[in-house]
Amino acid sequence: MVIAIISILVSLTLPAVQKAREAATRVVCANNLRQIGIATHAFCNSNRGYFPKSTHDTDIEGAWVYTLSPYFENVDSIRLCPVDPRIEERRENQGTSYIFNEYLCVKGPDQALSINHLTSTHRTIMVFTVSDTRGTASSEDHTHSRNWIRNPLSGNWARVLADVKADRFQGVGNPLTPRPSAQRTSGFAHYLFADGHVELIPCQVVKGWAEANINFALPNLCPVVE
């Protein structure tokens, strides 16, 4: 009888404990992104408004994970999400769980390489959560968002998911063997905007943007989440 009562109590309390643990990791993830935002603003202030570079346009030592390090208390902690299933690989390879928006750190069409080029910082996503299928090397530090939205439109969502982990929290399935992109509609992820605020945006909302042919990574053009 005692064992049965204990089993019932465990079954009742375990979901609450799991929810509390996930809430705690979400707070850590959001704080990591806020710290990246503070460091980026400090970097911009010291570099005439220009954002730090990615490995696409510079060597590894010149990329943002390294050039922002003087503004962090502990860059090795902040660059890694606590629930990233590949966290140890990224730690070992000097990789990152968060990736910079290509439009802000890679020269090309529609670039906004300086914060002074932005007319709406609260509608410009600066940093995303990296997809679990991306590599773990330090060179994997930026999105390929110029390639997300193109014909055929049916492939937009898959291209976004190849870059971004839009269902980092409360997603369904094994993160390292994800379900087909069409079935990836649950969960949430954090997004760091250029004004420094962090939003937890539902995966379904982001999927809707992609399927509506909206490149939400474009400077000044991320839709407002209702």
Image: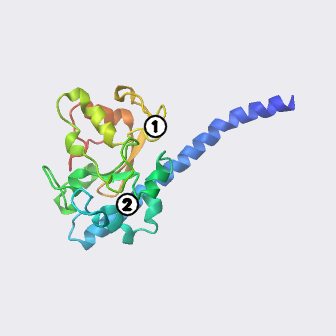
Q: Nearer the viewer, residue 175 or 213?
A: 175
Is tag 2's residue or tag 1's residue first in the polypeptide sequence? 2
Q: Position of residue 200 (x, y in %)?
A: 41, 44
Question: As drawn, which residue projects farthest toward the right?
Answer: 1
| Above or below for 190 versus 80 | above
Tally of numbered discs? 2
The amino acid type of the residue labelled 2 equals Ile
Hey, what amino acid is under mark 1?
A: Pro
Task: Residue at 33%, 37% (x, y): give it.
Answer: 161
Q: Which mark is residue 36?
A: 2
Residue found at x 21% / y 46%: 218
Q: Is residue 111 above or below residue 47?
A: above
Whether residue 216 is visible here, answered yes or no, is: yes
- Quadrant in the rendering for residue 20: top right
* Mark 1 element type: loop
Q: Secondary structure at mark 2?
A: helix
Q: Is residue 100 left or right of residue 112?
A: right
Q: Residue 3's image quarter? A: top right
Q: Position of residue 118 (x, y in %)?
A: 19, 56
The N terminus, quarter of image = top right
Going by the image, does 10 lie left or right of 32?
Answer: right
- Around disc 2, counting alpha carbons within 10 Å, would you say few (fewer than 14), some (14 to 19), or many (20 or more)? many
Q: Nearer the viewer, mark 2 or mark 1?
A: 1
Q: Is the image coloured rainbow, by chain, by secondary structure, or in one colour?
A: rainbow
| Mark 1 surroundings within 10 Å by alpha-carbon count, few (fewer than 14), some (14 through 19), many (20 or more) | some
Q: Which mark identifies residue 138?
A: none
Residue sitting at 45 percent across and 62 percent down? 76
Image coordinates of residue 62 in percent, x first then y, are 28, 66
Q: What distance separates the C-alpha of mark 2 from that of mark 1?
A: 24 Å
Can you tell which mark lies on residue 175?
A: 1
